[in-house]
Amino acid sequence: MDISEIKARLNSDINRVVEKLLPDGKRVGSEWEAGDTGGSSGKSLKVHMAGNKAGLWSDFASGESGDLISLWMACRGLGIGEALKEIKNWLGIKEPDFVGHKKSYVRPAKPKCSKPISVVRDYLTTERKISEEAITAYQVGEQDRTIVFPSKRDGELIFLKYLAVDRVNGKKKTWVSPDCEPCLFGWQAIPEAARAVTICEGELDAMTLWDYGYPALSVPFGGGKAGKHQWITTEFTNLDRFETIYLCFDQDSVGKESVIDLVDRLGMHRCRVVTLPRKDANQCRVDGLDKSHIDICFENSVFSSPEELKQASQYVGDVIESFYPTGDIEPGVQLPFKKLRGKVLFRAGELSLITGSTGSGKSQVLGQMCVSALVQGEKIVIASLEMSPKQTLKRMAKQISGLDKPHPDYLRFIHEFYQDKLFIFSLVGKSKVDRLLDAFEYARRRFGVTTFVIDSLMRLGVGVDDYKAQEATVYALTDFAINKNVHIHLVAHARKADTKAGFQTMTADDVKGTSEIASNAFNIIAISRDRKHEDKLKKAELKAGRGESVPELEELRDKPGVYLTVAKQRNGDWDGTIALWFDLKSYQYLEGSSQQAQAFLKYPPHLAET
């Protein structure tokens, strides 16, 4: 929850806020009156309690004024960061409880550099037209004809980036400190009380914008998306304090790509896109554009609002791509079975149902799909509401390694791989769908998660016979998948099978609950388990184990015990059933009776394996 949302919560509870902060004050008409921010009685400090100005205050004796957050800061003597933490605690706002592998970063050693006094100073001030004041504000250094850009937060050195003044064959030479936390450059130059900030694509642009009167932060790895924006994970909460974030990126395709991703993740309601008359801010400075030109650009900045009504002709590129994809295969996540390669995909903007009767193995099959998706590059949140995080991760460790009992070093390697890729919503029991989707939104925006797993529908506080609630829940999940361009896997139980009819594979009609569950799903994967065959095989193997002759043993082993049916694929052309064999040691589902379990994530040969 960022500062805009926090302020709205405070305004909605304004009576409690003023009573807490100004306990000796009193209400007079539509205002709360007090003596000062120390809370004494009097009339010089007034807080508007209703109307368009609700939440605004002024101290006519001191000249201070602002909103309820600044009032909290003044009354409690806190900076913006500490005030927001205290306000969140008071309001009962907590970050979603995720279990994930936390990466350990190292802090860089203090660089052996000096204040720019020679070649670096000449390059910055003469060639790039950056002021001495900006160099000082951003604490930029000089070391062996190299510019040193320190990224600091709360006075602590977090990250270092270097730029050589001399170019090699006309190309810039840059490098960063290894194993350091990705950090925005320029926190040391941002005023403590600032409610607006600019994020740009380069360190020189940030310093230039400061000169123009717009204190700015620069991304650490340039424009683009995906891996370029790994800094969001560590900086997400640090940006909570800003009501407005100006995105001032290069006016090229890479810069525009960055803006689209950042608006989506930092919040459409507070991101304003700035369009400059040159490639970037520093080029504007070099070309002699004065502050008035840049002021106009910021005044004309726009919120990137969704345009829901579009002409069909705008989609021509997407349609051509669907017929003639630029890659080898259509974008999406493949299932972990060769028989389905190129036939079935889990695409962004879809809701998939995984269904089957109790004990059919639907959650285990979904676990194998997840480890395969992780290896394919997906980031996943699993809300396994029927199983503890330890049990979920234990089962997935067997599946991703292909082993019954992976060595501890292998397990550490697996969980290192999970870092920033796999997160667990650590609640076992029932969870309301709104609470779950709030957590999913947080994970999508902060960590860039692309796939979400819910196991299961009936753990979302929805009654077995409450068809209206089931319908509303599935609508909410579908809307989230479409609007956020992510994929949701939802486990849904199946109706009881007719045992008199003998073994049958599951279909879309077997999904338990309202018909709207299956109707709204883009894909339906049904898992069927032939228990009678399993019992026959177990008895035959017990006999063989006792040395008895069992002529039908191989025939029984060759017959599959599990069937996966693609009962629906709205955006695909294939449906049908494949046979699977369950391997008890690895918890993997195999495609043949003689197939051996394989590692999705192989242990590196150069590491000593016990």
Image: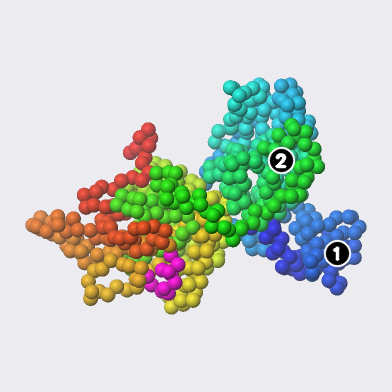
Neighbour tally class for label 1: few under 14, some 14-19, many 20 plus, Cα within 10 Å: many
Left or right of residue 335, residue 60 in this image = right
Up the image or down, 450 lies above or below 351; here it is above
- Magenta stretch: give its range: 511-521
Q: Amino acid at mark 1?
A: Lys
Does residue 414 appear anywhere in the picture? no
Q: What's the mark number on residue 568? A: none
Residue at the image position 58 percent from the left and 49 percent from the top: 261
* 399 part of magenta stretch: no
Left or right: 62 in relation to 541: right
Answer with mark 1 or mark 2, whichever residue precedes in sequence.
1
Examine the image and state in which quarter residue 53 appears. Answer: bottom right
Relative to 216, does residue 387 appear above or below in the rendering?
A: below
The reply to whether dot 1 and dot 2 touch (C-beta < 8 Å) is no
- Residue 556: image location, x then y, percent: 16, 59
- Indicate how the structure is coloured in the image: rainbow
- According to the picture, the residue beneath numbered tag 2 turns out to be 277
Residue in the picture at 30% in, 46% down: 598
From what the image shows, is residue 142 above or below residue 401? above
Query: Hey, what amino acid is under mark 2?
Result: Pro
Question: Mark 1 = which residue?
Answer: 46
**SS type, badge 1:** strand
